[in-house]
Amino acid sequence: MSDQTWASTSLADLFAGQAYATVKGYVRTYVMHRQLLEHLPPPPAPVLDVGGGAGHQSFPLAQAGYDVTLLDSSPAMLDKARERLQRLHGEARRRVTLLEADGENAAEAVDGRRFAAVLCHGVLGYLEDPEPLVAQLSRCAATGGIVSIMTGNARATAIQPALERRWQDALASFDARTGIGVLGLPGRADTVEELSELIRSRGVEPLRWYGVWLFVDWLEFSGVELDPSDPKEVAATAAVEFEAARRDPYRQLSRVFHLVGRKL
């Protein structure tokens, strides 16, 4: 996907507004936040969020006391981040820095600074070749620091079209690496093993991987509407998703996965 695509204000509205206002959006941020806290050093450790969009994943870390730098190439997404930043309390707001830059130039954009954690969530699938960006993530991580990547699961590409009863598309998807994602945009998927080997080649040792969505994904693509206005129901849903994301065989069936490694 080109930078021009992400620069679209309408796409930024969809991603920062509608996508995260759903039960599925809440599950993503909640589940990944808890997964991150299992590996992050204590605050105020510095965190770099590459392709961080409107800050849905990194702003909660700022609220938890971390020093957050959010880097994104899209002015429209950064405008959304600035809007959301104003909703944080003063101390958390002062812990956030916004940078406009391409992820493949991240090390230069942060002036060679090294971070205790480098996040890159939902970005690799829009790149034909993930290696240059992975190299940047590794360069930006301090020795002993965490690298956190979320991307599409190449072993589960048939799930979405099958649940949408697009049977011919599902049949063709078993061996496919590309498809249409939740925003209606084309994307590419990876396997846990391939991405693990890629980060290892850049000096990052894989620690653990997780799923992100499972049951909420299946329900959505089956046409079931989940109510985000019921906090008890949303919390119960997120608790189940958190457990599924940690366990086999459930995590293997997630359409996206979260891989965490440590810089050697």
Image (spheres, rainbow, N blue to C red):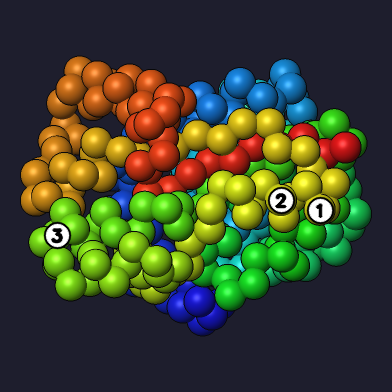
Horizontal and vertical percent position of residue 49: 64, 48
Q: Is residue 25 left or right of residue 264?
A: left
Mark number, residue 197: 2
Give the answer, above or below, for where 27 lies relative to 128.
above
Quadrant location of residue 111?
bottom right
Give the answer, above or below, for where 8 lies relative to 92.
below
Quadrant location of residue 72?
bottom right
What's under tag 1, amino acid-wise?
A: Ser
What's under tag 3, amino acid-wise?
A: Glu
User: Residue at image x 57%, y 61%?
Assistant: 124
User: Residue at image x 53%, y 41%?
Assistant: 258
In this figure, which residue is indicated by the disc labeled 1?
A: 201
Q: Residues within 10 Å of mark 1 (few under 14, many from 20)?
A: some
Q: Is residue 12 left or right of residue 89?
A: left
Along the viewing direction, whichever of 35 and 162 lies nearer the viewer: 162
Give the answer, above or below, for where 3 lies relative to 264.
below
**Does the residue at mark 3 contact the one at mark 2 (Cβ under 8 Å)?**
no
**Does the residue at mark 1 contact the one at mark 2 (Cβ under 8 Å)?**
yes
Horizontal and vertical percent position of residue 160: 25, 57
In this figure, which residue is indicated by the disc labeled 3?
A: 164
State the separation of the CA atoms marked 1 and 3. Answer: 38 Å
* Helix, strand or loop at mark 2: helix
